[in-house]
């Protein structure tokens, strides 16, 4: 292999974390398409379903805080591998339970293990990509969340009808164990990898300067106490706290929205949900493309390109407030509006996560991702406990479930602009 020829092995690594993220979201979103099944077969209420969802989020939050530190210390190869292994076992184990408490136990274990995905993925991107490509790489792997959410409605209803709900958890859980084989054989850090040329290595390390302000693994790892003293950490945490719960809402309640508003069964809701996530995939990849375009073609500094892009994405969520009004006209208009909001979320999320590797040293990226992810999960817990659980129970009993969804769509529309303003004033003009 010529050392002068530019190889592109970094995109193989990006593909690996894309598939891991896809499997991650398949495993966590399976249950959203079984809500009506469990209501019929096991007499679950909205409160029961919300309690299982909340348990997952609580343990996901706990896991995120610890996962980042474990991955920073153990390294991406071992840390990521262990995370996928344990969440796959937890997914398979879900097929063995049949009570609400049993589901809370196994879904809690799933949340604890799945917490490793995003800290490990962001750390991998920081190791394998220069700053100017990180938003694009993050957008690509983060689109795995959309693909996972697309695969789920297109496959789970068929599996449930054909073989029963138990097999939905078994089949999806096995996918992670298959992924582990590829991860073990293909992942090595750039400097030790035999498949990349010197030209690609130079490109990967082109903006890595051994300085405390840049992304490098040199030097001692920063403690939680040190990281929590930084405004950048709290700005990232605020962004995750306010906007992550919106994606949780789509993930766990969107099938119920279409089933409840249009009085259709699980198989009827599959296609509208799948189309929403297909549209959101464009946002995930496009969200990384826009700041890259502004940096490369317009000569903008990274922080300005990132901030302006995120503001545009926040504005794109606003039309979701009209979703219930459009529901009386045509279901596909509703799908388009929710799909636009979901696409904007993924574009926002890709850039929000990339700010971590822009601002923090590589030795701390997984830890900061863990802290921010924990706050995102806490936001999801609070939203479920104090808004969704009581809101949906009350309005469904009153026969006005559409009112609950109208309130939730208003929350969705306002969350991103509020998060953007907080991040802007906390960090100022020099960062993010």
Image: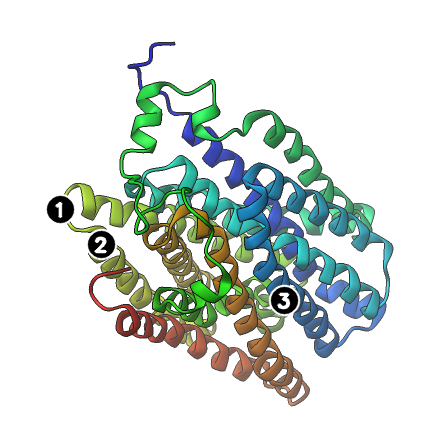
What kind of element bears circle 1? loop
Residue depicted at x 38% and y 25%? 8
Residue depicted at x 78% and y 45%? 170
What kind of element bears circle 2? helix
For residue 298, which numbered disc appears in the image? 1
Query: Can see residue 329?
Result: no
Q: Quadrant of residue 185?
A: top right
Q: Quick one: which residue is furthest to the front in this view? A: 220
- Residue 314 placement (x, y as % from top left): 32, 66
Residues at marks 2 and 1, CA–CA distance in whole angstroms? 9 Å
Q: Quadrant of residue 253?
A: bottom right
In the picture, the quarter occupied by the C terminus is: bottom left
Mark 2 in CB contact with mark 1 (< 8 angstroms): yes
Instruction: Reply above or below: 240 against 163.
Output: below
In the picture, the quarter occupied by the N terminus is: top left
Residue that label 2 marks? 305
Q: Which sits earlier in the primary sequence, circle 1 or circle 3?
A: 3
Q: Quick one: which residue is furthest to the left in this view? A: 298
Closer-to-camera residue (283/245): 245
Residues at marks 1 and 3, CA–CA distance in whole angstroms? 41 Å
Residue that label 3 marks? 57
Task: Specify whether 422 is left or right of 181.
Answer: left
Instruction: Reply above or below: 86 against 432.
Output: above
Q: Residues within 10 Å of mark 1 (few under 14, many from 20)?
A: few
- Residue 39 placement (x, y as % from top left): 77, 70
For residue 344, which numbered disc appears in the image? none
Query: Can see residue 11?
Result: yes
Closer-to-camera residue (60/70): 70
Residues at marks 3 and 2, CA–CA distance in whole angstroms? 32 Å
């Amino acid at each position: 292999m010529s050392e002068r020829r530019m190889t592109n092995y970094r995109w193989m690594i990006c593909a690996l974390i894309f598939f891991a993220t896809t499997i991650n979201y398949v495993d966590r979103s399976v249950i959203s398409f079984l809500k009506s099944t469990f209501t019929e077969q096991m007499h679950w209420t909205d409160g029961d379903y919300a309690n299982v969802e909340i348990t997952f989020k609580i343990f996901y939050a706990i896991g995120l805080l610890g996962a980042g530190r474990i991955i920073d210390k153990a390294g991406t190869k071992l840390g990521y591998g262990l995370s996928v292994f344990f969440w796959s076992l937890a997914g398979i184990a879900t097929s063995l339970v049949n009570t609400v408490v049993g589901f809370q136990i196994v879904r809690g274990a799933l949340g604890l293990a799945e917490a490793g995905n995003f800290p490990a993925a962001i750390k991998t991107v920081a190791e394998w990509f220069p700053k100017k490509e990180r938003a694009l790489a993050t957008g690509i792997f983060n689109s795995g969340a959309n693909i996972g959410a697309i695969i789920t409605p297109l496959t789970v209803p068929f599996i449930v009808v054909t073989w029963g709900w138990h097999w939905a958890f078994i089949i999806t859980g096995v996918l992670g164990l298959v992924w582990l084989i590829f991860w073990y054989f293909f992942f090595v850090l750039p400097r030790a990898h035999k498949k990349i040329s010197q030209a690609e290595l130079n490109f990967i390390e082109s903006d890595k300067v051994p300085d405390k302000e840049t992304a490098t693994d040199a030097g001692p790892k920063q403690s939680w106490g040190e990281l929590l003293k930084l405004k950048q950490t709290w700005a990232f945490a605020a962004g995750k706290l306010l906007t992550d719960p919106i994606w949780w809402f789509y993930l766990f309640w969107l099938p119920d929205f279409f089933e409840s508003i249009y009085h259709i069964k699980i198989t009827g809701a599959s296609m509208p949900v799948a189309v929403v996530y297909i549209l959101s995939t464009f946002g995930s990849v496009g969200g990384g493309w826009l700041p890259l375009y502004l940096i490369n073609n317009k000569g903008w500094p990274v922080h300005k390109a990132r901030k302006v892009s995120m503001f545009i994405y926040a504005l794109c969520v606003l039309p979701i407030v009209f979703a219930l009004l459009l529901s009386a006209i045509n279901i596909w208009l509703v799908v388009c509006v929710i799909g636009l909001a979901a696409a904007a979320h993924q574009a926002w999320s890709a850039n929000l996560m990339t700010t971590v590797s822009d601002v923090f040293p590589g030795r701390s990226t997984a830890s900061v991702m863990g802290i921010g992810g924990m706050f995102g999960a806490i936001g999801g817990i609070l939203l479920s406990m104090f808004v969704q659980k009581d809101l949906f129970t009350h309005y469904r009993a009153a026969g006005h479930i559409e009112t609950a969804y109208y309130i939730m769509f208003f929350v969705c529309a306002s969350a991103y602009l509020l998060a953007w303003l907080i991040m802007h004033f906390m960090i100022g003009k020099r960062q993010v």
